[in-house]
Image: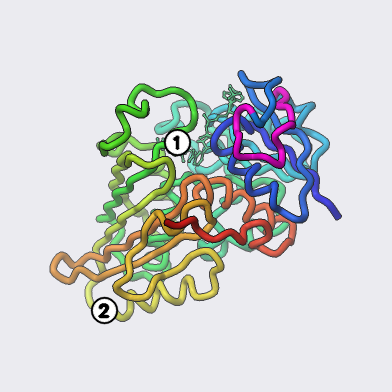
């Protein structure tokens, strides 16, 4: 049976990446592709790499254009998804790449996003304990933010195994510029962003902090506090996250390694590298894979875990398609077999 799929926000980076993956997905047929200011344009003029769909024309993002498909991907600015999603039929599988349905706490949503909370959907990070079961058969998926994907995969095994302290988690991530979307931003002009690194969203203000804390707190069974600082790296794609946390008294390096090894032993997309080999963003580019490594800094009594992923693939569109596969009962890696691009 062919699955009909609509993609909204198809003129943007996340929507374009969903289309790149779906174009090679053997079970789906791509129906409506929608945009906002660029509706009416040929996809080939906006995303020239998508040859298979070059002559398709973008239509307006309306409920009428999106309804009538088995699956609808929403790749819209946060705040725009909730209204569209609420008007789509209950039996349509809706996969939201934006933030609107990621947070369970209305108070956290209002504090960080400053608008009304739209609700909470099953979270599209199947590698977290118990999460795959919540995604199977669901009709709604909230795709994680790109930074929370790397951060949670980096430290989840330690919290799930009760090895880490909850009150001293520090996460620093470097992201490629596509993480900020396609719209024009002065600090992302080529001449500003290339050849230079910068820090932003400092001082506990980044919207992804409550999402990370929500994930860790569920695993730890207590409130976890995260200090997160994002930085912008002069590359189009990729995230390198370094996450550190204090280790509980008496925990050994071998226990840490065993927890991480067991957590990801059967995962198709998350790879704990052999000891001594450290993740690189280059190795996972364009793929749904995540590389991980950890070390025990016994001097500071901290675990140091590093994760590399492609923000547009495992950080958004790959996770969205992986979640679709699970929700529909397909093999989880259908359409996601691509390896990284090197050099
Ligand atoms: N970039 C990334 O790495 C990640 C992005 N995401 C999320 O995915 C979503 C899309 O992000 P991204 O692709 O980067 O952003 P882009 O700015 O690249 O694309 C935004 C898309 O939304 C459309 N759009 C803009 N305004 C509206 C509106 N008011 N109503 C309906 N559609 C609108 C645009 O259409 P048009 O161009 O025609 O105006 C475009 O298709 C966001 O929620 C983002 O947070 C999640 C994880 C990572
Ligand atoms: C480099 C850069 O600017 N990255 C974006 C995160 C992209 C993302 O995941 O955004 P959503 O949570 O809105 O889906 C940021 O820091 O806001």
Numbered circle sitting on residue 332:
none
Q: Position of residue 56 (x, y in %)?
A: 74, 31
Q: Which residue is mark 2?
A: 252
Q: Is residue 164 above or below residue 97?
A: below
Q: Position of residue 150 (x, y in %)?
A: 42, 54
Above or below for 82 versus 155: above
Q: Is residue 57 magenta?
A: yes
On whether ligand 2 comes within 8 Å of the CB at mark 1, the answer is no
Name the element at disc 2: loop
Q: Tell me which segment is drawn in magenta.
A: 45-60
Q: Is residue 189 above or below residue 195?
A: above
Q: Is residue 152 visible?
A: no
User: In front: mark 1 or mark 2?
Assistant: 2
Seen from this angle, which residue lies furthest bottom?
A: 254
Q: Which residue is mark 1?
A: 107
**Residue at the image point whose x is 80% and y is 49% from the top:** 3
Indicate yes or no: mark 2 CB to ligand 2 under 8 Å. no
Query: Residue 185 at what x, y percent from top left?
Result: 40, 24
Residue in view at x 46 percent, y 35 percent: 109
Q: Residues within 10 Å of mark 2 (few under 14, many from 20)?
A: some
* Residue placed furthest toward the left: 299
């Amino acid at each position: 049976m062919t699955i009909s799929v609509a993609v909204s926000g198809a003129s943007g980076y996340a929507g374009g990446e969903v289309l790149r993956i779906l174009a090679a997905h053997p079970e789906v047929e791509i129906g409506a592709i929608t945009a906002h200011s660029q509706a009416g344009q040929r996809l080939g003029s906006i995303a020239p790499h998508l040859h298979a769909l070059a002559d398709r024309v973008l239509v307006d993002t309306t409920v009428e254009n999106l309804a009538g498909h088995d699956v609808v991907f929403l790749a819209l600015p946060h705040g725009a998804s909730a209204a569209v999603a609420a008007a789509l039929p209950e039996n349509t599988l809706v996969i939201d790449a934006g933030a609107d349905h990621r947070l369970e706490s209305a108070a956290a949503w209002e504090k960080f996003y400053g608008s009304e909370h739209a609700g909470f959907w099953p979270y599209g990070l199947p590698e977290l304990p118990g999460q795959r079961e919540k995604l199977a058969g669901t009709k709604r998926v909230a795709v994680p933010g790109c930074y929370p994907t790397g951060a949670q995969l980096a430290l989840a095994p330690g919290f799930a195994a009760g090895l880490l302290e909850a009150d001293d988690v520090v996460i620093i991530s470097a992201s490629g510029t596509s993480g900020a979307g396609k719209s024009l931003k002065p600090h992302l002009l080529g001449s500003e962003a290339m050849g230079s690194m910068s820090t932003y969203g400092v001082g506990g203000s980044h919207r992804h902090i409550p999402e990370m804390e929500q994930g860790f707190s569920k695993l730890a069974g207590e409130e976890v506090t995260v200090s997160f600082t994002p930085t912008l790296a002069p590359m189009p794609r990729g995230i390198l996250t370094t996450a550190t946390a204090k280790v509980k008294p008496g925990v050994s390096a071998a226990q840490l390694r065993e927890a991480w090894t067991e957590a990801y032993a059967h995962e198709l997309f998350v790879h704990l590298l052999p000891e001594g080999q450290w993740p690189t963003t280059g190795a996972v580019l364009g793929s749904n894979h995540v590389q991980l490594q950890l070390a025990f800094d016994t001097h500071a009594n901290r675990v140091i875990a590093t994760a590399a992923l492609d923000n547009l693939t495992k950080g958004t569109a790959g996770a969205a398609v992986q979640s679709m596969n699970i929700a529909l009962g397909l093999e989880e890696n259908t359409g996601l077999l691509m390896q990284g691009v090197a050099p």
